[in-house]
Image: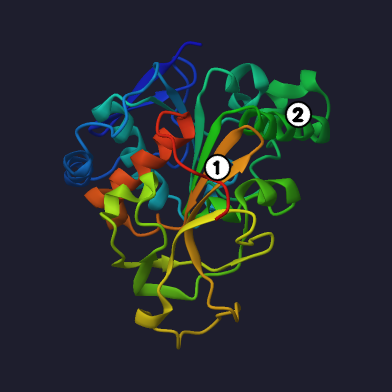
Amino acid sequence: MNTGWIAMGLTAFPLVAAGAPVPAGMESLPPHRAEQIRAAAPDAARAQPRRPRRVLIWITPSHLMPKDPHAGWCIPYGTCALTTLGEKTGAFEPVVSDDVAVLLPESLRHFDALVLNNSSGPWITPGDEAMERLAQHGDRQAVEDLLRNSLLGFVRGGHGMVAIHYAIGANNHWPEFRELLGAAYWGHPWNEEVGVRNEEPDHPLLAAFEGKGFRIAEEIFQFREPYARDRLRVLLSLDTASTNMGVQWIHRTDNDFALAWVKPYGEGRVFYTAFGHRAEIYWNPVLLRFYLDAIQFATGDLPAAAEPR
């Protein structure tokens, strides 16, 4: 598989094919922000890769990007941060794409893990431009079925997936996608400083937090079915005792507001975190370490328990 590199600002973003157009939504960041992100990223990965790793960073396709609430904001900041983590530490080769063709089996097999970078909307359904290139696989429904099976089979077959923030709000027409992630989006009652409970201080994926809870200013989600603690392993959750619980639009009545979890999916590994809305998240050294550990978990280089407790 040939990878091309397109320079954007201070960061070079690898694309699926040499000379490919720059995916929509990957706008250049202000130079000082790209510098901040690079300075905040860890110098080395926590685990030595067992072999060279390639990670697909998936963003909202161009035909959906104009309506994406994170276009020009979380997505380019997240793309810069995620690619920087791979480039600076050497833990993985980052490849950024918004082209559904990269989700076909013959392409996905070149990757060790997939990171959903705030990608939203029904992106598993190919747009008109993609259909012009994929028509040999049948009509739109046939192509979508192929893409669905490819993605699920990729994770089920032993690969990994990391989903960040609003990635959980995508593909609402696809129930198996919600099962894959472990929950469905149910609004964001908070966009303020909240308390976060560290539910498993000794878990390898929480090492960045040094065994402690913390406070963070962020847009905080709540989740609905299929979310259930007997189906996934919650790592971080909202500390309701130190959070403003007087905000509107709280739907859950059990005070169970998970903010990060892991789960097995067949032979594969799934990680989700709700953190990833505010721009300053992406130059927070603790959260960048958290993201990197999650990616190394997804590639299989950082072993960590994923079964429900």
Q: Nearer the viewer, residue 201 or 195?
A: 201
Cβ–Cβ under 8 Å for marks 1 and 2: no
Q: Label 1's element?
A: strand
Quadrant holding the C terminus: bottom right
Residue 50, above or below 67 = above
Disc 1 versus disc 2: distance between alpha carbons? 21 Å
The residue at 28%/34% (across/down) is: 46
Residue 106 lies in quadrant:
top right
Closer mark to the observer between disc 1 and disc 2: 1
Residue at x 50%, y 30% (from the top left corner): 113
Give the residue type that dot 1 points to: Val
Estimate the x, y position of residue 246 in percent, counting from the top left.
45, 88
Task: Give the x, y percent position of residue 160.
Answer: 53, 34
In the rendered image, which quarter is residue 304 located in? top left
For label 1, the residue is 270
2 displayed left or right of 149: left
Residue sitting at the far top: 2
Residue 215: x %, y % from top left: 29, 69
Residue under numbered circle 2: 146
| Amino acid at pointer 2 | Leu
Q: Determine whether, in the image, residue 203 is placed left or right of residue 153.
A: left
Which of marks 2 and 1 precedes in the sequence?
Answer: 2
